[in-house]
Amino acid sequence: MRAALYHRVSTTDQDPATARHELRAAATARGYTIAMEVEETGSGARNDRPGLQEVMSAARRSRIDAVLVWKLDRFGRSTLDLLGCIQQLVAAGVRFEAITQGLAIDPRRIDPTANLILGVLAAVSEFEGRSSASGPCSASHAPAEPVAASAGRLSTTSTPTGSGP
């Protein structure tokens, strides 16, 4: 199988050497031929990154059989974009693997458990991306926001003493 190894870092301060080494080792252990290696720097919230587009183009043109990523959030941070890209890979007959998370999406075999894990990890990836964008401590020092339930059962407002029904 011909594999594309894809890794993204958010800033130039991050060192992709560990991920690069582990991706190459995973491809070798699986008996894959490395057809392309793509490393890029940029926000995972955008799916118009040149390296990602290069991998997706190779998949559409049947130049690769598998895409290996170190971790799902290195492939992208937007839940919709992640699921859309993986759906395109599956439609092209390309396997997708997040090697450190034990996630494998095989286009030849529908696996409801893998799809569930993919959905959860994609949501967590987006959550982490949005949380880290606002800073590591901003949520802990921000005033509490009211929480509203759709059925109106939960209220954060209190009734002043003595003014009840």
Image (cartoon, rainbow, N blue to C red):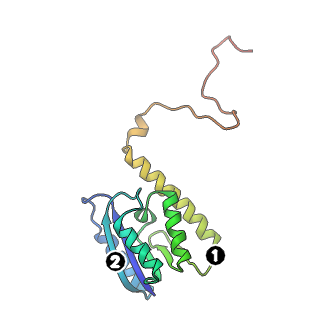
Residue in the foreground of this view, choosing between 73 and 59: 59
In the image, residue 78 above or below residue 21: above
| Mark 1 neighbour class, 10 Å CA radius: few under 14, some 14 to 19, many 20 or more | few
- Residue 156 position by quadrant: top right
Residue at position x 42%, y 52% in the image: 129
Point out the tag, 1 or 2, that comes first from the N-terminus.
Answer: 2
In the image, residue 132 above or below residue 105: above
Residue in the foreground of this view, choosing between 77 and 22: 77
In the image, residue 33 above or below residue 128: below
Q: Position of residue 111 (x, y in %)?
A: 63, 74
Q: Position of residue 51 (x, y in %)?
A: 35, 69
Residue behind mark 1: 110
Q: Secondary structure at mark 1?
A: loop
Residue at position x 47%, y 77% in the image: 60
Residue behind mark 2: 37
- For the C terminus, the quadrant is top right
Residue at position x 51%, y 74% in the image: 89
Give the residue type at disc 2: Glu
User: On the rendered structure, is 83 left or right of 4?
Assistant: right
* Mark-to-mark CA distance, 1 and 2: 27 Å
Q: Position of residue 10 (x, y in %)?
A: 32, 58
- Residue 117 position by quadrant: bottom right
Q: Do the residues bearing badges 1 and 2 touch, measured as CB atoms within 8 Å?
A: no
Q: Secondary structure at mark 2?
A: strand
